[in-house]
Amino acid sequence: MKKEYLELYTDYLMSSFSYTTATGLSVMSEGKISHDKITRFLSSEDFTPAGLWRLIKPTVREIQSEAGVIIIDDTIEEKPSTDENEIICWHFDHSQGISVKGVNIVSAMYYSNGYRIPVTFDLVRKTKTVVDEKTKKEKRISEETKNEKYQRMLKACVKNNIKFNYVLNDVWYASSENMMLVKEKLKKDFIMPIKTNRKIALSQKDKLSGKYVTVSTLELKENTQQEIYLEGVSFPLLVIKQVFKNADGSEGVLYLVSSDLTLTYEQITTIYHKRWKVEEYHKTLKQHVNLCKSPTKTVRTQSNHIFASIYSFFKLEYLSLKSGINPTALRTKLYLTANRAAFNQLENLKISIAMKF
């Protein structure tokens, strides 16, 4: 890709407060770059996760530490009015409990020394069409599951020699297979929640004899951890129970398991709290770098715009930390500056007209 065009386009995404178009960028640059050049830039080649890694690698090396964590999660940005294709299609949104039309992005974020850096990502591409057995209607499916993406991304993080000790994710990625990959193959530790119906053994002897109970039956005292054996996992884990109040006043329970047996209850909860950083990343992508505020039409230009939005997040994060201004405040500052410039221009225009008459 042409780096100069990428930098210009991503600066445009960071500073724009409405839909971002090639024509809009051309107008903003006062014709210094034509909209045709931007269109050709977005459609010239596929911008890949490997390309993102080359761009962010120097910063990762600068801020990485053994205390760093890799957080993997996915988000859906709804695009109800855009024509359906392999990336803009129907995805099940677990937060809403329904299928929505949009883009499903899986990201691996590196969090270290206060920096939130997306080190790799992938789009859920539903390239295959099958007939649903229940509805007898055609539907799109992906030939790679999100758990397979999860595993591939973690392998890439290790291959790229990113320093981290823990992998954090939500319950949807808490499969036994993923746990075994992190601990046994990648030689890292993890902290992740498990569903209340997961089967556990209270000792290795119980595990060998197949004596399992559901984790919800476990009587755990407050602020304590207990060693257990999860069905399908060959090594022991620590489990803790968090009880919290939901927004509606109801009581919620979260069971967290850790493959690091040296951790205390407080350490487990403190480390896992860092997972919230990926939620902040998703929010910033949608609100501050124009993730889906683009009229791009083809799979390639849509994918490349998403790549540019993710790189824009990285640039915004870097500017935020270096300036000491959080991303929301930084964007607000840009917005107010633009408003003042428009207001001053209007006042000057009024004065100019008044002087003529």
Image (cartoon, rainbow, N blue to C red):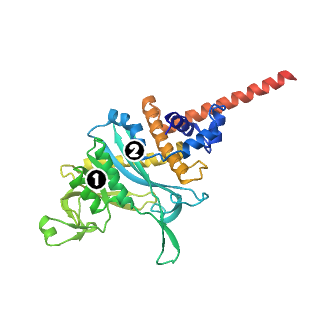
> Badge 1: few (under 14), some or many (20 or more) residues near its Cα, within 10 Å?
many
Image location (x, y in percent) of residue 92: 47, 64
> Badge 2: few (under 14), some or many (20 or more) residues near its Cα, within 10 Å?
few
**Left/right of residue 26 with respect to residue 119 in the rendered view:** right
Along the line of sight, which residue is nearer the eye, 169 or 139?
139
Image location (x, y in percent) of residue 142: 44, 63
Mark 2–mark 1 distance (CA, rounded to whole Å): 27 Å
- The residue that label 1 is drawn on is 191
Residue occupying the point 17% across, 65% down: 202
Along the line of sight, which residue is nearer the eye, 101 or 36?
36
Whether residue 223 is visible: no
- The residue that label 2 is drawn on is 50
- For label 2, the SS is helix
Toward which corner of the image does residue 299 lie, by quadrant? bottom right
Marked residue nearer the N-terminal end (2 or 1): 2
Residue occupying the point 27% across, 61% down: 177
Residue occupying the point 31% across, 43% down: 160
Q: Amino acid at mark 2?
A: Ala
Image location (x, y in percent) of residue 196: 31, 66
Image location (x, y in percent) of residue 9: 55, 38
Whether residue 245 is visible: yes
**Left/right of residue 297 with respect to residue 236 in the rendered view:** right
